[in-house]
Amino acid sequence: MRIARIAHPEGVAFVTVEGDEGAEVAAEVAEHPFGNPTFTGRKWPLADTRLLAPILPSKVICVGKNYADHAKEMGGEAPANPVIFMKPSTTVIGPGAAIRLPADSSRVDFEGELAVVIGMPCRDVPRAKAKDVVLGYTIANDVTARDQQQADGQWTRAKGHDTFCPLGPWITTGVDPADLALRTSVDGELKQDSTTSLLLHDVPTLIEWVSRVMTLLPGDVILTGTPAGVGPITAGQQVSVTIDGLGTLTNPVVTR
Amino acid sequence: MRIARIAHPEGVAFVTVEGDEGAEVAAEVAEHPFGNPTFTGRKWPLADTRLLAPILPSKVICVGKNYADHAKEMGGEAPANPVIFMKPSTTVIGPGAAIRLPADSSRVDFEGELAVVIGMPCRDVPRAKAKDVVLGYTIANDVTARDQQQADGQWTRAKGHDTFCPLGPWITTGVDPADLALRTSVDGELKQDSTTSLLLHDVPTLIEWVSRVMTLLPGDVILTGTPAGVGPITAGQQVSVTIDGLGTLTNPVVTR
């Protein structure tokens, strides 16, 4: 099942997206998509609506240096345990929305990532049960002001600017995240080409690790880290992240 | 005005707290305390209610090394610009609620701090207008697993455990935050004794700095940093942070 959030002619709604590419239909979900969603019966051709970020998370937890080749390109070793950081919820934007480059950074990078969307309140989730707390998977771009990341030591400012967490195009349920091809391109030029099978700490391990620290709530998002190939984006470009089975997340880049 | 959140015999509410110490009355606010709050007319003796965290923030932004003496005791220089990090909203607890020590940390420290509560959606707030976006001030304890802070580099895990952000006892409006005495004690023994006049980056500067990065929403909280004197807390102890004019925030410490 594919769960999206859309702006339709009469408002905003969670929907499921059914049908083949180019002829998708959005079927309105009553209230929220957690548990066993029910439907209102209203439907729209997806093309007549606008996709929004598929979820508004109460928190976005990210994992640093979780692919060996990216840890290497950043000039460091991969840490033995997952290193987590956060992006404020105000960073979240949907597909097609503009990434806005802040005036006080001279280098903003894309980072394509697999994102886990949590489906129920949980804490102390063992690896073996991690799958049970997942609503589904989507695509994220962990946009980063690289100069600010290096200057501050803590990464919150560098990764916390408004618009720095594109999510989407939708949440896909029933996916095995163990080996999904991930590609990022800028204006059509391939920049990252990897697979989630290269995650140093896999999705169940990350859920166990994070939920040992903090309670996760429905809609919370875990960004699993980015592979090698990160690089700058500049105003006027378009950045696309594609994950097999999850779709493509495309965002234009503009100056703030 | 003092704004609190309480559990009363019939539910949970925002209230204002009126009257002298020991004889306070809680007057129920209709809906929320932002803008020009109105009252339902219901009142309770405060002693018959239980204080909760005065606000449930969408985000908690914290500032590192914002007192010179604390930067020194941590073995570093104070940074030229504010260094920000986040605590997840799931860390927030109220006065009297237990700080729960995680099993995987051997050293958890208290950090008494002045906390700013934002009153309206805002971004790019200049120093001179910072006062206009503040709802009021409260007290925070930026509880920190010191060993995890040192191990991880990023501070999110160390500072992100459930219960690691006591807030309260209430939000006081109309306060000038420029020179408020701040004291932290553990089981009655004075550990931190400072004043907010020693903040390296004062409250207006922090609001300007943070809101240049991210949109702040009503109820968002900025923790302004802790002075020297931080130290460990262990199960069975009580930690109290007092700020002149804002009250005292006391929390017991237990093993998780």
Image (spheres, coloured by chain):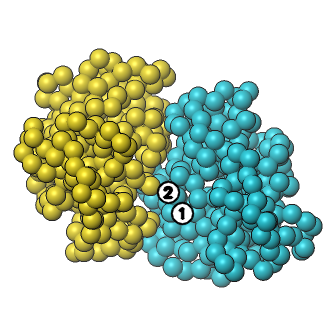
Chain colours: A yellow, B cyan
Give the farthest residue toward the left. Answer: A20
The amino acid pointed to by label 2 is Pro
**Relative to B219, A135 lies left or right:** left
Query: Mark 1 sits on what residue?
Result: B91
Query: Mark 2 sits on what residue?
Result: B88
Examine the rendered structure and indicate whether residue A10 appears above or below residue B149: above
Q: Nearest the camera: B205 or A74?
A: B205
Q: What residue is rendered at 14% in x and 24% in y?
A: A188
| Place of residue B135 in the rendered image (x, y in percent of width and height, measured from the top left) | 72, 46
Q: Nearest the camera: A129 or A1?
A: A1
Separation of residues labelled 2 and 1 (CA atoms): 6 Å
The amino acid pointed to by label 1 is Thr
- Label 2 sits on a secondary structure element that is loop
Examine the rendered structure and indicate whether residue A32 appears above or below residue B135: below
Q: What residue is rendered at 44% in x and 55% in y?
A: A58
Chain containing the residue with disc 2: B
**Relative to A203, B10 lies left or right:** right
| Place of residue A208 in the rendered image (x, y in percent of width and height, measured from the top left) | 31, 68
Q: Are marks 2 and 1 in contact (CB under 8 Å)?
A: yes
